[in-house]
Amino acid sequence: MKIKNHIILFLVLLAVWLLLNSSFEIHILIVGVVVSLIITLIFCRNCNVFSEIKLTPKAFFYAIIYVFVFSAALIKSNFDVARRVVTPSLPINPGIVTVKTKLKSKIGRLILANSITLTPGTLTIDIKDDILYIHWIDVLSTNIDEDTQQIVSRFEKYLEVIYG
Amino acid sequence: MVSILLYISLGFMLLGISLSMIRFIKGPLSVDRVISFDVMTVGSLGLIALIAFFTNRIIYIDVALVYGLLSFIGVLIVARYLERGL
Amino acid sequence: MDGTLQIIGAILTLIGSIFLFLGSLGLVRMPDSYNRIQAGTKASTLGTILTLLGIAFINPDWTGKLILLILFVLLTNPISSNVLARAAHYINIPLYKKTVIDKLKKEETIKVNVSEDKINTNSDKKEDKQ
């Protein structure tokens, strides 16, 4: 299990280095591999967040779908904000509600919180265990189950497969 | 055609950054100032990329990368200071 | 010079800058800090991403660095807004007067035990037991 963390961290670092240089010349590749390897060996004592990512084909497929779902939500949220801002009467109805998440892994919760922040009218304020506190610009209901259904579930069904 | 559209978007971007500057000056609380600072810097990333296109120098993209990193760390530090002191 | 790709990129850049402008307008118009954070973060994230994507379309040689910048903005901008909102709630920045509900408030008052509203704390505890 531990070697998986090292491999994922190494690949991420190498990808960042190659994107930064945007060239595949041999000396750049060698420098990238050596430096990524050194950083991985020194700093990966307890980077156990990566071991929660599943590396199955199904997870990969769901990750691609998730990118599209997330992009659609992001664009929709921006139109939502633009509509609210441009309307002269400022139609907002804000409040802080709670939702529950089923995700166990840390990185899955991070991605979930980030996605919630970027989707229409919601902003993650705090997270305690499996309860997320969310500032909602247009509160429709204050019941925890309905809010979970409305805000979280559309991302959770993909993230559950990817991060377990 | 392309450069006309880019000049128009440059204008919109500068207008947006000026509006956040208004909130930065007016903002009654420190949190308002920090959030307008954040919006200003993130908007400036796009502005720097546009300037990099106009002057045709890729080095400005690196400047934008470091600028974004510094702004993120700055916001984190200010938020931490507001929450429990340094 | 003006290929189709360049024109698509210029239009994307224009849309991004308009979103950025609308987000800043929201920053000025919204009534309290939390709503300002919402408007500012969302609009600035998508605006910057679209602008950088447009530049990447116009000048395909720079795509690698611009993709790195896009991923960076996408990952860090929600985190900074989240941290700011949490700090704002922690130091009791008041919510907008039309705010419907504040479920985080109850637990904060119990945990921190602010001395100035002890009556409030007790009533909150009762509500919590239900």
Image (cartoon, coloured by chain):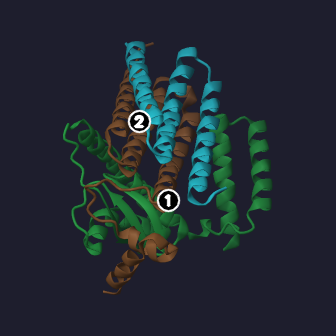
Chain colours: A green, B cyan, C brown
Residue A116 in view here: no
Residue at image position (25%, 60%) is: A139
Q: Is residue B74 above or below residue A9?
A: above
Q: Which residue is mark 2?
A: C47
Residue C48 at x, y = what percent? 45, 35
Residue A2 at x, y = what percent? 69, 72
Query: How many neighbours does mark 2 have within 10 angstroms: few (below 14), some (14-19), or many (20 or more)?
Result: many
What amino acid does circle 1 point to? Ile
Residue at image position (45%, 44%) is: B32
Q: Is residue C75 left or right of residue C7?
A: right
Q: Which residue is mark 1?
A: C91
Residue C14 at x, y = what percent? 37, 25
Quarter where residue C39 is shown: top left
Residue at image position (50%, 62%) is: A110
Subunit of label 1 = C
**Count of numbered marks:** 2
Q: Quadrant of the C terminus of chain B?
A: bottom right
